[in-house]
């Protein structure tokens, strides 16, 4: 097993889904089912998942123990459903030196900007996560601009998932994706990135199938960053052979190491931290001959700079 400390690297995982108890309740209700009170594990025998505890602090503690076990300094918890930022905030409040929280928001809602303010100023969250294809909005829609204005005022990074969207839990239970592909193209973000130059936008998973568009966007917008998270299964849909080494090499050529951010996309237990993703990406960066200082930027410094955190 690769030892991160032995290599003198400090790691921030920029992409962890916080699957709270409320998330599971909401997921089941949305499909007309309720989490049984007596034996909730029955529903998860097929995917083999642990149902999260009702107390988000207990779940946060489990994340921190995983970070400790794998030598990861900080983890960013992404709120996984709308209106569940309180769960993330409770975990982050208990472990402020190890966990950072992002709010999930539907930026087309009339109260979206207010929710952002509340999440940051009252709950201590430090970023925004959105799913254009789930909430059915284009990133250039001016209804979204009040959220960008708050992000610019408060210094918040904005993560928008573009491209393919199939949740791990949906895949495990053989459920169809609810995403609307009309809103999947990261080029939608170009106008907003231009209009809000002090907002740092992050496109995860290399654009999740829209790799070319993500590179075009980032090449023209210096405030667009690329996150490396997930196993990047989208590569198999490309019309030509592609592997992660080529993806990382091309991203480095276009945007440089200063705008690439490491993440894993881990989400559930008992699988826990995706060390395989960390080791694969780190090995590729080393094989490409990337300087250690640049690897450190990708593995943590870039995100720490965006968040203004000392680590």
Image (tube, rainbow, N blue to C red):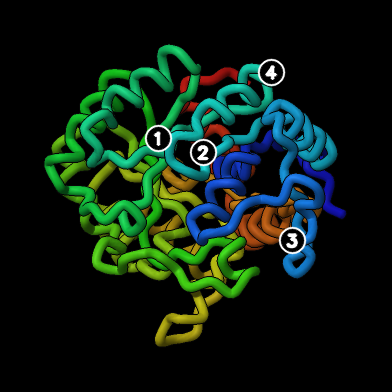
Question: Of circles 3 and 2, which is in front?
Answer: 3
Residue at 20%, 39% (x, y): give it.
144
Q: Are marks 3 and 2 in contact (CB under 8 Å)?
A: no
Residue at the extreme right: 1
Q: Check the image and report above or below for 15 versus 237.
A: above
Residue at 72%, 43% (x, y): give it.
52
Q: Is residue 200 visible?
A: yes
Marks 1 and 4, the one that precedes in the sequence: 4
Marks 3 and 1, the one that precedes in the sequence: 3
Q: Which residue is mark 2?
A: 79
Marks 3 and 2, the one that precedes in the sequence: 3
State the image coordinates of residue 149 (x, y, percent, origin top left).
21, 27
**Label 1 element class:** strand
Q: Which residue is mark 1?
A: 128
Residue at 45%, 55% (x, y): give it.
252
Question: Of circles 4 and 3, which is in front?
Answer: 3
Q: Which residue is mark 4?
A: 94
Residue 171: quarter of image:
bottom right
Q: Which residue is mark 3?
A: 44
State the image coordinates of residue 137 (x, y, percent, origin top left).
23, 52
Q: Check the image and report above or below for 31 versus 151.
A: below
**Viewer-closest of 65 and 116:** 116
Q: Spatial distance from mark 4 to mark 2, Cα to Cα?
A: 16 Å
Q: Spatial distance from mark 3 to mark 1, Cα to Cα?
A: 29 Å
Q: Spatial distance from mark 1 to mark 4, Cα to Cα?
A: 20 Å
Marks 4 and 3, the one that precedes in the sequence: 3
In the rendered structure, find residue 271 and report the number of the disc placed on it. Answer: none
């Amino acid at each position: 097993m690769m030892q991160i400390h032995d290599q003198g690297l400090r790691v921030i995982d920029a992409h962890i889904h916080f699957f709270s108890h409320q998330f599971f309740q909401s997921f089941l209700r949305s499909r007309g089912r309720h989490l049984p009170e007596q034996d909730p594990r029955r529903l998860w025998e097929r995917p083999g998942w642990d149902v999260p505890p009702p107390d988000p602090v207990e779940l946060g503690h489990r994340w921190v123990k995983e970070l400790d076990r794998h030598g990861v300094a900080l983890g960013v918890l992404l709120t996984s459903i709308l209106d569940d930022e309180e769960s993330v905030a409770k975990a982050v409040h208990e472990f402020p030196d190890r966990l950072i929280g992002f709010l999930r928001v539907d930026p087309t809602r009339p109260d979206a900007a207010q929710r952002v303010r509340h999440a940051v100023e009252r709950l201590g969250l430090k970023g925004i996560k959105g799913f254009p294809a789930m909430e059915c909005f284009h990133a250039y829609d001016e209804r979204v601009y009040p959220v960008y204005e708050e992000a610019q005022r408060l210094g918040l990074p904005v993560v928008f998932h573009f491209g393919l969207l199939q949740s791990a839990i949906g895949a495990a239970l053989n459920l169809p994706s609810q995403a609307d592909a009309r809103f999947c193209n990261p080029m939608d973000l170009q106008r907003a990135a231009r209009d809000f130059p002090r907002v740092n936008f992050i496109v995860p998973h290399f654009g999740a199938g829209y790799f070319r568009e993500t590179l075009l966007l980032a090449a023209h917008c210096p405030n667009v960053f690329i996150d490396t998270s997930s196993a990047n299964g989208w590569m198999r849909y490309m019309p030509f052979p592609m592997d992660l080494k080529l993806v990382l090499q091309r991203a480095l050529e276009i945007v440089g190491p200063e705008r690439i951010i490491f993440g894993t996309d881990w989400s559930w237990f008992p699988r826990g931290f995706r060390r395989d993703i960390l080791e694969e990406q780190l090995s590729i960066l080393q094989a490409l001959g990337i300087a250690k200082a640049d690897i450190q930027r990708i593995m943590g410094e870039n995100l720490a700079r965006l968040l203004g955190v000392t680590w």
